[in-house]
Image (cartoon, rainbow, N blue to C red):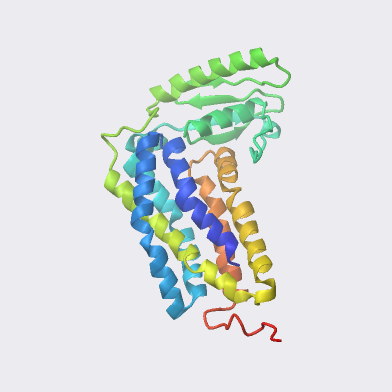
Amino acid sequence: GLTAGQAVVWYTGQFYALFFLTQTLKVDGATANILIALGLLIGTPFFLVFGSLSDRIGRKMIIMAGCLIAALTYFPIFQGLTHFANPALEKALISAPVVVTADPAKCQFLFNPTGTKKFTSSCDIARTVLANASVNYSNEAAPAGTVASIKIGDKVIAGYDATGLAKDDAAAKDKAFKKELGDAIKAAGYPTKADPEQMNKPMVLLLLVILVIYVTMVYGPIAAMLVEMFPTRIRYTSMSLPYHIGNGWFGGLLPTTAFALVAYKGDIYYGLWYPIVIALGTFVIGMLFVKETKDNDIYAADFHV
């Protein structure tokens, strides 16, 4: 009811925002990192603002409000990042529909948290390449055993199945497939990188600052609230365990889960459903079961000799 939502809001506002700018919107690394750094610099004082505010009105409501507001606004904010950072990509997503036709039985959920799993079916390869290229697509079912194909406008590109191929043969097919697909999506209007001249940097920065403010809402009061929930003799273990489960598991799995969702649906924004669902779940559980701690006496349960 606290740390899971805090974790996904934090990861989304900092790490996933950077990933989205560089990997999805193709903003060059230097520009993206500078914008993220400026957003953090501007937003950091709000840690003090919300920490201090929680001393007066309570921890719970600020954290719950941060989770709820973030969940309700992530889609328009990230769509805004696309609009202001890479308008050419936004236009291509609307004007150049892409269709992946494949045997559904050969299409896996591309969840790979350790990076060791190999996806070798033609469907998985096609969806991975398209997701990495920031291309939205719809899925059409094909008869069993059909090799996946990708339709971009009037052009159809045949996929390939890497199952059982030797390493060199798989690499050669991968290179040829990516080149043909890359040429086709470029011809359809998809940019290979964001144009700095078309980027509205002040608006991108504003949206990044808003994301950081969400982080400060959930993070500013969390340490005090966790301390106030447990007596001294078990406090370290009791606050450390949920904090690290929330941040290590729920937050740590955000990038790989978000990519798997994007590849599954064929929508660059679909990965946002992971932090949205976790944040909303935290809001509901927190409102129902978590008690306000602001006025708790953290020494009341201590043993006195």
Name the quarter where the C terminus is drawn: bottom right
In the figure, is residue 87 to the left or right of 129?
A: left
Tell me where residue 119 sits by quadrant: top right
Tell me where residue 189 sits by quadrant: top left
Tell me where residue 125 sits by quadrant: top right
In the figure, is residue 163 to the left or right of 263?
A: right
Position in image of residue 303 (x %, y %): 70, 83
Q: Residue at x 53, y 67 (%)?
A: 222
Which of 18 and 85 lies nearest the eye of the viewer? 18
- Check the image and report above or below for 46 versus 232: above
Q: Residue furthest right?
A: 164
Position in image of residue 88 (x %, y %): 34, 34
Position in image of residue 246 (x %, y %): 61, 58
- Check the image and report above or below for 87 versus 142: below
Which of 146 and 1 lies nearest the eye of the viewer? 1
Q: Residue at x 59, y 41 (%)?
A: 260
Residue 303 seen in the current view: yes
Which of 230 and 17 lies nearest the eye of the viewer? 230
Q: Residue at x 57, y 82 (%)?
A: 296
